[in-house]
Amino acid sequence: MRLRLLRARRRGDKAPAQAPARKPLRGHRRRNYRKESHQMLQMFRNFFKSKLGVGVTLAFLVLMAVAFVSADSLGTLTGSVSATDKVAVVGDDRIDVTDLDRAARESLQRERQENPGITMEAFVAADGLQQVMDGLVTRSVLQQFAAMAGFRTGQRLVDSELVKDPNMRGPDGNFSQDTFRQVLTQIGVTEQAYREDISVRLLAQLVVSPAQAVPQLPASIARRYSELGLETRTGSFIQLPASAFAPTAAPTDAQLQAFYAANRNRYLRPERRVIRYAVFGEDAFGNIPAPTAAQVAARYNRDRAQYAASETRRFTQLVVTTRAAAQAIIAEVNGGTSLEASARAKGLSTTSIASTTKAGLTTATSAAVANAGFSAQQGSLSAPAQGSLGWYILRVDEVVQQPARTLDQARAEITAALTAEQRREALNEATARIDEEFSQGKSLAEVARELGLTLTTTRPLTAGGQVYGTTEAAPAALGPVLPTAFEMEESEPQLVESVPGQQFLIFDVSRVTPSAAAPLAQIRNDVATAWRVDEGMKRAAAAATRIQRRVEGGTTLAAAVAVEQVSLPGVTPLNLSRQEIERQPQVTRPTILFFSMAKGTTKALEVAEAEAWYVIQLSDVETESVPANNPRVQAQRAQLAQLLPDEYTQQFIAAMRQEVDVEIDDEAVTALGQLLAGNGN
């Protein structure tokens, strides 16, 4: 595909300042920045379906979260945050606004590979900036902990990693300094920054990998989990739908405005782009002259050997170790046994040789084998001949004689080949000329007039390939170029060869409508409905709390619900076993909570997707006893052992974070998030 690449912005990374001397580990904390540890082996809480896959993979993702960053400049930052502000102090290191901004933009770019329509505003709204912040903190913690533990990565070790990287190899398959520089230019980072990232990745391997050494799970724990898998629980629940508590009156303007302002991200519209394009074939470049007689004759003389008489043969071969063995097999075949049957009787097998010339067979075997094979008649066996693997017996399965062809006989074939070559050359020249015209500033309309084409203008399209506001797909001709169109600037024409040698496309982006929240006036009814649901959920939450307290005070669940002056569904009894739950294709959140509660407790749970609150009561738990020698215990032990390395790694990373002081400037992080979301980048 001939496509003029977008000009990437090149930015330089500043070399990091020399780190101060490391301080010893401290027991006190200015701020303990760690997430509350999950319970050991999450599969119990999630019915043996946990998401523990953290491990070294998590560590590497964290380390790579800021690798190969786009190095966007923060020189335009204004307001409550500036490029020189710090957002966190991790031990002896600091994380600046610049670092967080770069990492956030790079993370957004990676996310766009899976979700092309996502904007920075949506990314920030989905806590993407907070996750990036957490990744930067963990990266710094790993670096400092490795240094405190005495781990080092020298230049030679980093060099060895570079040499092993296939992306850094030249045409000869070896590490190439030129290729290395080209890669650095493409990803927009300095050599020092790239080497530092390799160093940190190696430190992570040294520090974290030992935690993944396969541990042995005690049999008593495996037995307990086996018993849990057989337990049966009884209780009851009540659903408190938001609709039962939602206000019936319409919201006031002030209420609606406040709700809309607090939930703008719910109403984000995707970025839309209008594309102008024209599809055309090779006929748009004018007629291509036919090859002349002189050109045909010259090509015939150049390839004269190709048109000389030739013979190709197809064989079945058998290779044995001695000439005597070959002679014996030939005698058996002459006596009426097939070559394949004779080979099977001796524990051997035949192979096929595709149609080949005598020269080709010589290269594959030996001159003696080729002479023997091309001396035998079709259907007969060749005389035994010694080759590279032993003594060969060849059966001639097919002989194809190709007589010599004169210039007149080959003229049509040569003319077709020359026509295709000349057409390709002409097309290459024409597309190169158009590409150069675009590079020199010619507009799409000007090139379209030059080619005699009529431009088509699309309706606004989304990055997902649909006409905005409909289920209609974007024009099929734009399918291959739509991702590029959503990376381009306006009025920057491009040329692509959509079907090699047959179909071409010129296009540009004539209008870009950035992603933004829909105006309240256009979605007033939808916002009012959402406000009622939100208010209903708030009131349902208050009712769930009241019911829970009554039950905890000794009232039955039914009696506690009856006090509420709202029409609600009845109390539903529960009697479920874990085995029943494991057979279900999908487990609901209330059921998950039911199997996570302690006997005799009552819990309230919000289920936003169901627009309801639940109050769940667990009355009794019955568990079967499983003998230690039960096969179920061993199976459970093997299953849990697969999860232990990741669990241990997760706990180890959490422990490391406790050993390094962490201070987060939440106001600076929030301010940057607001700035990024406001820019809509």
Image (spheres, rainbow, N blue to C red):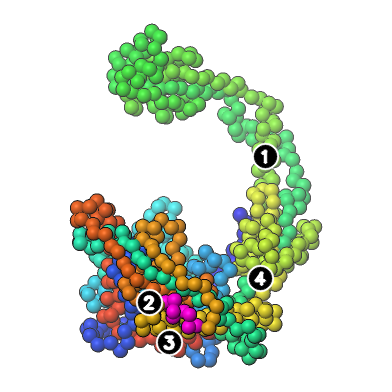
What is the crowding at mark 3: few (fewer than 14 residues within 10 Å), some, or many (at least 20)? few
- Sooner in the amino-acid sequence: mark 4 or mark 2: 4
Counting other residues with Cα less than 10 Å from the Cα at mark 1, is it few (<14), some (14-19), or many (20 or more)? Answer: some
| Numbered label attached to residue 388 | none
The answer to whether any part of residue 113 appears in the image is yes
Measure how far apart labels 2 and 3 are at the Cα level: 35 Å
Q: Amino acid at mark 1?
A: Leu
Q: Which residue is mark 2?
A: 602
The local crowd at label 2, few if under 14, some if 14 to 19, many if 20 or more residues have their Cα within 10 Å, is many
Quarter of the rendering occupied by the N terminus: bottom right
Residue 561 part of the magenta segment: yes
**Disc 4 marks which residue?**
272
Alpha carbons under labels 4 and 2: distance apart: 49 Å
Locate residue 149: give its quadrant. bottom left
Q: Nearer the viewer, mark 4 or mark 1?
A: 4
- Are circles 1 and 3 on residues that touch, CB within 8 Å? no
Q: Nearer the viewer, mark 1 or mark 3?
A: 3
First in sequence, mark 4 or 1: give its number: 4
Residue 666 tag number: 3
In the rendered structure, are the residues bearing label 1 and label 2 in contact, judged by CB atoms less than 8 Å apart?
Answer: no
In percent of width and height, residue 292 lies at 73, 38
Which secondary structure, mark 3?
A: helix
Instruction: Give the structural element (helix, strand or loop) at label 1.
Output: helix
Q: Amino acid at mark 4?
A: Arg
Label 4 to label 1: alpha-carbon separation: 46 Å
The residue range painted magenta reads 557-564
